[in-house]
Amino acid sequence: MGLNLLSVLVKGSAYERGAQLGQKGGHLIRGNRDYYFTSWKKYGGLDEEAVYKFMRNFVEPIKNYDPEILEEIQGMADSAKLTLEDLMAINARYELAISRMGIAKPTGEACTSLAATGEVTANGHTIHGQNWDFRNLERCILVEEIQDNGKPNIAGITEAGRMGILGFNSAGIGVTANGLISHRDSADHGVPYWILIRGVNNSITLDGALSRVFKAQRSLSGNMMISHEDGEVIDLEITPDNIGVMYPEEGILSHTNHFIELRHQVQDLFRTSIPDSLIRSHRAMKLLARRRGKIRVEDFKAVFTDHFSYPNSICRHADPKVDPMKGFTTISSLIYDLNTRVLHYSVENPCEHGYQTLRPKSLAPDNGKMERAVVSKSRQKRPMT
């Protein structure tokens, strides 16, 4: 029998939302914190104080990037009876693993992202999703955040204590994430990768989402696929000093865990660890392309349950030869219909457990239209005087 995700609805100020997350999911946040600290001690020899010292490097960059994000993190820490550094460790775990455990030992999520624009879907909607391959589903939550101060509401799945959400917002913007590692990664300063994801979550226009990534001080590599309900999809291959851009080919775009656009400019340190990335990206696009013009959510489900090159397939399964704390498995499959704001998600492998559906009321399309109307109105030219 599969796991059930804790479903949490929070609202109010940034600190209040964080406090509610800490109150409702504190046991999961503490468990997530302990999981990472145990792993870093076992595989990197890092004690608690070494982790805390490293995490303090990111407080000021996050505050400068978006002070409300830091306020929400502080709210979670206080409510879950943890320190700010404990919560920073969840949000900057990627950075610590790269910086302190060495880029010679690549780590990250081995995921498959896929999107189709309205010109190739059966109903004209933008459909976007991913298989999230990692190893900690029991410490994840299904979250819906009702935000204030002009920011959109957000729904999706995230790790307990992490600000970046795999999902979409009430402005019709979706985001998925894929691990990338390059020789340029320093990872000991700047805005953490998952905080950049939250910056995208918080955006009400596509260009605004891109600005939150391009203008940030970045410290490591990673991939984001960002989509909009009006049929635009863009993929960003991110490094500390450059960003490669990819667009859909005949309405379809896929990405996994190797550099494509920037392949001649960086030394790809993740590809040698998970060469199946080269298969998954091409195969996902090929399988979906067979349905071009008739693509539905069900076709995404068929791709995300594909087992070619098992167990290191698009639907990834545990490899008994690999340490469970180092290997990956598909812990969730997510599919977004951005026009209807519906999330289809699996709890563990979708081939075994199927999909569930979430229709968050606070993200209804009418809410998004109101937000875009406000943006459009604010950008109208003032009359000449």
Image (tube, helix red, strand yellow):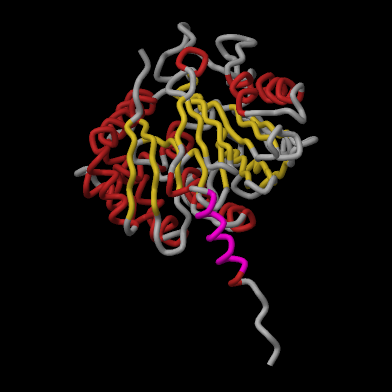
Q: Find the residue positioned furthest to the left.
A: 81
- Residue pictured at 53% horizontal, 60% vertical: 371
Is residue 71 magenta-colored?
A: no
Q: Position of residue 258 (x, y in %)?
A: 65, 29
The quadrant holding residue 353 is top left
**Front-most of 204 and 220?**
204
- Residue pictured at 49% horizontal, 38% vertical: 166
The quadrant holding residue 252 is top right
- Residue pictured at 64% horizontal, 31% vertical: 114
Q: Position of residue 45 (x, y in %)?
A: 34, 28
- Residue pictured at 33% horizontal, 23% vertical: 42
The residue segment tinted magenta is 365-376
Q: Quadrant of the N terminus?
A: top left
Query: Magenta span: helix, strand or loop, mainly?
Result: helix
Q: Find the residue positioned furthest to the bottom.
A: 385
Tell me: 294 left or right of 31.
right
Tell me: 117 left or right of 225.
right
Q: Position of residue 257 (x, y in %)?
A: 61, 29
Is residue 264 among what the camera can see?
Answer: no
Residue 254's place in the image compared with 286, above or below, is: below
**Front-most of 121 and 8?**
121
**Front-most of 27 and 95?**
27
Q: Position of residue 7 (x, y in %)?
A: 34, 35
**Front-most of 240 and 286?**
286
Is residue 369 magenta-colored?
A: yes
